[in-house]
Amino acid sequence: MSAFRIAVAAYPVERVKDFAAWEAKAEYWLAQAAASGAALAVFPEYAGMELTAIDPASVDDLHASIAALGDVAAAVDATHARLAAAHNLHILGPSLPLRGPDGRFRNLARLFAPNGRSGAQEKRVMTRFEREEWDIAGGDALSLFETALGPIGVAICYDIEFPLIARALAEAGATLILAPSATDSLHGYWRVRIGAQARALENQCYVAQAPVVGDAEWTPSLGTSHGAAGVFGPPDLGFPADGVVALGAIDVPGWTFATIDPAAVTRVRTEGAVFNHAHWAEQLPRGTATALPPVVRVDLR
């Protein structure tokens, strides 16, 4: 696979007046990413919560506003599919809590390819707020997205803090893991970022973190969010000494760009000073294997 440019958003959740206003915002952001040469644009976890503003009857009620998102989910997907084709972009859309067939809500992010194909990843491990106040359930299988850019995994926010999730994606072939996030404190941002950098080290791969930023006190789902967009790799051969490939400014909205080079992953895994990816099993008792989450391959090529 060839190297490509990634655009990672530090995205402000704003009180959009209607769906057309949200759609215009999405078009503006993605036109910027495409004009800068990006082949993949990554939006944060729960960035879609700004859509709760368009239903005045439910906007102040946490559970009612979450439920109302189901009415616009298909239109959101259609917008991202259209813009992916128009700009020749792969797009990880902002995640939304959506109700499943069992009646439970799950936090779902969808990856769109320019050819019209798409696939979804649910967040697996819920934070305390999601469990205790939102009543959002965890997802099951992990998805490895086979794309024209190469194999891509998604570990949503808290998920990137758990090594076996990223490990399952890496063993399935991921050289890039996307970590969309939403954190209401700098403590939370650093937990996710440290997790992202640790997963990049352990698996000798790229991890891209896209956070929500700014004040959204009008919605009970978010409040004020903090973070910086970043792309990380292993601190070894061909990568920066600190593993930071690209980094935006804390709490400043905008895109952060980086080059993702699958060949650099292959090189560091075969010629690096250390072989974290290959030596993973040696931390275990001899003759045993790690039980990893199942991974489903989703062909978006």
Image: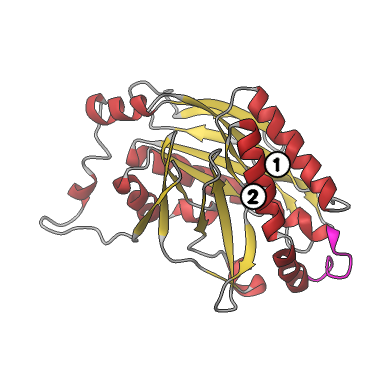
> Hey, what amino acid is under mark 1?
Tyr
Q: CA distance from mark 2 to mark 1?
A: 10 Å
Residue that carries the numbered disc 1 in the rendered image: 11
Q: Tell me if residue 138 can be seen.
A: yes
Q: Secondary structure at mark 2?
A: loop
Which residue is at a point 73% across and 56% down the rendered structure image? 49
Q: Which mark is residue 44?
A: none
The boundaries of the magenta stretch are: 54-61
Classed neighbour count for the residue bearing mark 2: other residues with Cα under 10 Å, few (<14), some (14–19), many (≥20): many
Task: Point out the tag, 2 or 1, that comes first from the N-terminus.
Answer: 1
Please state if 192 lies on the left or on the right of 74 as rendered.
Answer: left
Circles 2 and 1 in contact, beta carbons < 8 Å: yes
- Give yes or no for residue 196 being in the magenta stretch: no
Quarter of the C terminus within the rendering? top left
Residue 57 lies, in percent from the top left, at 88, 70
Q: Residue furthest left?
A: 287
Residue 199 lies, in percent from the top left, at 40, 44
Q: Tell me if residue 184 can be seen.
A: no
In the image, residue 257 sits, relative to residue 182, either above or below, namely above
Chief SS of the magenta region = loop
Q: Residue furthest front?
A: 115
Q: Which mark is residue 94?
A: 2
